[in-house]
Image: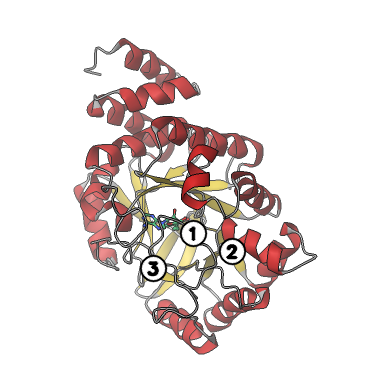
Amino acid sequence: MATDDPRLLEIREKVEAGQRLSFDDGLALYATNDLFALGEMANLVRERYNGNFAYYNVNTHINPTNVCVYKCDFCAFRADLNEDRAYTMGESEIKERAEQAHARGATELHIVGGLHHKLPFQYYVDVVRWVKEAAPEIHVKAYTAVEYEWFRKIERGSNLRDILQRLLDAGLGSLPGGGAEIFHPEVRDQICGAKASTETWLDVHRTAHELGLHSNATMLYGHIERPEHRIDHMIRLRELQDETGGFQTFIPLAFHPDNSRMDDIPKPSGVMDLKTMAISRLMLDNFPHIKAYWIMLGIKTAQVALSFGADDLDGTVVHEKIYHEAGAETPEEMTIDEIRRLIVEAGRVPIERDTLYHRIERDGARWWPGEHIDVPALAGVVR
Ligand code: V47
């Protein structure tokens, strides 16, 4: 490694020996300007865990409603019930979306939306049921921890376990990682103080893991948070993962300010994006995968991120609304050929996966899951 920064050399030794990095190590990584040294260290871990593979899936998003009781400062997607842009999808629209997704070969539907104060919990259960009726093979990755906490509140007398079980019975397959934002109260209280607390977010994922579900985790960065808040966030996730082993993928989400109440904040820079990707890979030593979500990062940065710790690009993604409302300039969809070309050009081997990281074998729009892609360095932690 070309660096002569003694602190980085010390961290490098730990990384080579497979030792856990501390909070102070994380801060030292954010303090360095040696992006190449940082990227090279993250790449070492990335290749130790996932070799030269880069994963993607074929998926579609459904946001059943944008009506939301909360007014998170960063959100450009939400609407009040009486606004013209407010909508709620019914059974036929959800089923049509699921059928379309199935017809084009999607293996996953990613479902998240607003917390609608007039809809009962049964509506959210029905959304999952409608999808499974229309397209039984599709994996439903649905609802953030914030939504689960809302369901618990509106379905009086139920606990989180009952709520999750009812959705499991309707066909739920796993949980996406949204709603995590920044766990540290100095930031969380300011940008989304009203919604599910850090403890609740972690508790929803813990309970889901106990029920045998896998989930993802995110972190929204590039707004008012500082490096210590990001490192604190990663360490809280690492601790829960030590306990349960149920997380699959960590997704750092770059903040998009347009149309939000924080539109005076500039978008995170390319350096910040790559640093955060690399540091995530280094700090989250018990997460099998780190995702470069191209919709948020932009296609070019996501491609470069495959050499800075990331091993996954998410999917072909159709009908993405949350970031496009907030000014994302990426297209709403990439074809399989485009994703594979980006991966090959980055020197990686493209592997189509399903939500739970089984290889997908494909013959046009028809597909079937192959073997599970094990991460050798984490044997025993993930299925
Ligand atoms: O929690 C909202 C973020 C998240 C903005 O699990 C914004 O595979 C940037 O979690 N600028 C929801 N970010 C999306 C999400 C996700 C995305 C892709 C894959 C997976 C997965 C999960 O979107 C929210 C919030 O952190 N968000 N508004 C914004 N203006």
Secondary structure beneath dot 3 equals strand
Residue located 24% across and 12% down the image? 4
Pointer 2: what residue?
Answer: 173
Quadrant location of the N terminus? Answer: top left
Residue located 35% across and 31% down the image? 42
Residue located 37% across and 52% down the image? 55
**In the displayed structure, would residue 129 be above or below residue 261?**
below
Q: Nearer the viewer, residue 214 or 49?
A: 214
- Please provide percent x and percent y for residue 248: 52, 48
The answer to which quarter of the image holds residue 260 is bottom left
Residue located 50% across and 81% down the image? 88
- Please provide percent x and percent y for residue 87: 46, 80
The answer to which quarter of the image holds residue 100 is bottom left
Amino acid identity at mark 3: Arg
- Please provide percent x and percent y for residue 53: 35, 46
* Quarter of the image where ligand 1 sits: bottom left
Pointer 3: what residue?
Answer: 362
Q: Residues within 10 Å of mark 1 (few under 14, many from 20)?
A: many
Cα–Cα span, label 1 and label 2: 9 Å
Left or right: 33 in relation to 148? left
Pointer 1: what residue?
Answer: 355
Tell me whether circle 1 and circle 2 mark residues in contact (CB < 8 Å).
Answer: yes
Q: Earlier in the sequence, mark 3 or mark 2?
A: 2
- Please provide percent x and percent y for residue 222: 34, 43
